[in-house]
Amino acid sequence: MSLALLLEKYDVSTDEGLQKALHEIEKEELEVDEALSDVLGRSASLEGHLRAASQAYSRLGAVRADAEAAAGMVDRTAALARDVSAKVRQLDLARSRVAECQRRVHDLIDLQLCSAGVEAAIKAHDYETGAAHVSRFLSMDPGSVEAARARGAPDPRLAMTAAANTLRDCLVKKFAEAARAEDDAAVERLFRLFPQIGQPQEGVDLLANYLATQVDTIIRRVSIVSDPTSDAAVFADALTRVLEAGGAAVERARTSIASCAPGSLPRAVKPIQPIICAGARRIFTAMRSARQLGPAPDPRRLPHPPEPRAAEPVLAELALSHSRIRLYFAFLRRKTESDAAPLDEAGRAAALAAAEQLIAGCDLVRTAQDLLAHYLALERYFLEESVAKALKMATPQPGATASSLVDDVFYIARKVIRRSLSTGSVDGACAVLNDVASLLEHSVAAALRGWLRAPPEPLPLPPPSGAGPDLVGLLAQRLNRDVDAQRTLFLVHMNEAESGAEWSERLAAEACAEAEPLFRSPGEREKLQSCATGLATAAAAFRAAHELALEGIKAGLKPRLHAWADFIVNPDVDPDEMEDDADALPAALEALAAAARSQLSPRALGALLHAAAAELAAAAELLLLRRHYTQESALLVERRARRLAGWAGGAGAGPREKCARLTAAAAVLAVDHVSHAVDLRRPAVGVKELLARRTDFKMEDIKRLKL
């Protein structure tokens, strides 16, 4: 530290400041001494490093000379390498030209040998060797022949082309001879030679024509129906045999062309498909004649329309025949896709498009459409006649207490829908679904609605004591009507309407689930689901009929319910009969519930009891404000309301809630003093209006009441 800094830091005018400055100077002196000692201690090593550096510098001249010599040597080596590399490239170019020249010379020699070899093979009937020569000729580089012609030499391809054409003519001739002799081995052997001579498509055409000739003979044999009048599906079996024969020919063609001409299956099937179509058309014509289907699909135009039960075997045969055709088309698409698998995406798309075009243009599609048209018309006839018969059998008859309408109708509907799905046609299934939905809505549900429009005598609800005579029952006895039987049949039809709604929704769900294997695109699924919604409309029609019946029952019970409501609020009571009087209404309602429970579904029973309790409580609330009560009569009304609420507690939440309002009003009416009404639950009607019904309460006290 400098002297100036010490003088600034310490006050040297005092002894203490001088001592601190002196101590600081001594401390710095010790540090300087230690640094000097360290430098002096390293002086020996520094001298050694300086001597080593001096010696290394003396050797740098020799190192520089060696490095310059090495650099010169590398430059000379690089120049030599460049010269050698240029000569190697020239040598490689010359060698490649020599190789190309040799290959062209060999091609020209082979071309002459191939021409002579083909002629010799034709004379020796050794077509495999001749085809191998032609294949060698086709694989030659066209540049070899062009180079020979450029030098003025004659074109050697003329002789080879003539020999190849001669070989092709011989192969076509031999193939025709083998086809006439039905020599399958020779046909296969000759077919495999056509790709070698550059004519794979011609070979495919020849093989397809040969297979078409064979399958024509087979189809004519298997399409014969021995017993056309049999009830069994003999025509569907014959059609199955025809399609199986055609499928076997398609599979044989695919196997043969798989290695030499992939993607050519539609071309191979083209001559075979008309034979299959003709066989299927002959069978359909014979079926239409034997099954008396007529030229028009509608069976009602026939002179003698068939019985619905007799039409079922024909329907099953038509559905089976159509499904077999659909399966054949699916088989053809699948085999085409398998045959085109080795091709690129564009090739596969072209092959599949050719297969779809072949299917769309063949007569087998029209045969399938004719089959489906006859099936749909006959199925509609069967459905309408069967449902009409079921409706006729279910028409209410005097004394009848049961009906099998829903069981019969929905058994028929399920059978018809499942049979339509067995055809394999989404359009056919949609048409049948539309027919079923329309028939259920406009025939079955409409018939039930007509039968349920005018209900008979209501369910048995005992009248209160002292009520007037049962005029409806007396009138029914005088008219000699079996009221109980009519009521039972009415309730049966009401339950059938409820079951019809459930079955309609179940049929729609089953149809959509069972049709899943038929869908080839999302559009087909959406189409069938849209048609299945028609059954939801039918379900709504059944529910409307059920609600109509339920409203009729409610309307029939209203007079008795109003009588019981008047009984609840009646202030007149005999003290000796007070206990029995309070239990009369729950007993009557329990009798009603017991009678309805055995004849209605749980859902309909709950709705009926809910409506009865609501009607009873609402009517009693209104009548409370029309009577005057003493404390004793008000207590009786409260007891009746509590007994009613107790019964409603076991009947369900809905009736219990309705009766709670009446109980609250009765409790207000039965208070001991006007002021006690403040602590009670507020009823729906006014508290002061209820208290005003008490003859023992003063109006001044009621008006002063603060709620």
Image: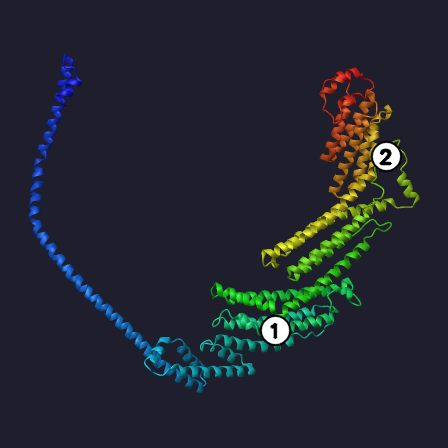
Q: Secondary structure at mark 1?
A: helix
Circle 1: residue type:
Pro
Residue in the picture at 84% in, 30% down: 566
Residue most extreme to the right: 478
* Image-based side of 221 in relation to 24, left or right: right
Image coordinates for residue 422, horizontal then vertical, percent: 66, 61
Circle 2: residue type:
Pro
Q: Is residue 650 above or below residue 188?
A: above
Image coordinates for residue 298, horizontal then vertical, percent: 74, 64
* Image-based side of 8 in relation to 452, left or right: left
Residue in the picture at 32% in, 76% down: 103
Q: Is residue 165 above or below residue 390?
A: below
Residue 48 vs residue 61, the one in the foreground:
61
Question: Is residue 151 visible from the viewing direction of this image?
Answer: yes
* Image-based side of 658 in relation to 47, left or right: right
Image coordinates for residue 629, horizontal then vertical, percent: 83, 22
Upstream in sequence: badge 2 or badge 1? 1
Residue in the picture at 81% in, 53% down: 394
**Tags 2 and 1 touching, CB below 8 Å:** no
Colouring of the image:
rainbow
Residue 36 vs residue 363, the one in the foreground:
363
**Residue 274 circle label:** 1
Residues at marks 2 and 1, CA–CA distance in whole angstroms: 83 Å
Check the picture and name the quadrant holding the N terminus.
Answer: top left
* Image-based side of 402 in relation to 507, left or right: right
Discs 2/1, front: 1
Residue in the picture at 86% in, 49% down: 399
Quarter of image, res 36: top left
Residue linked to disc 2:
463
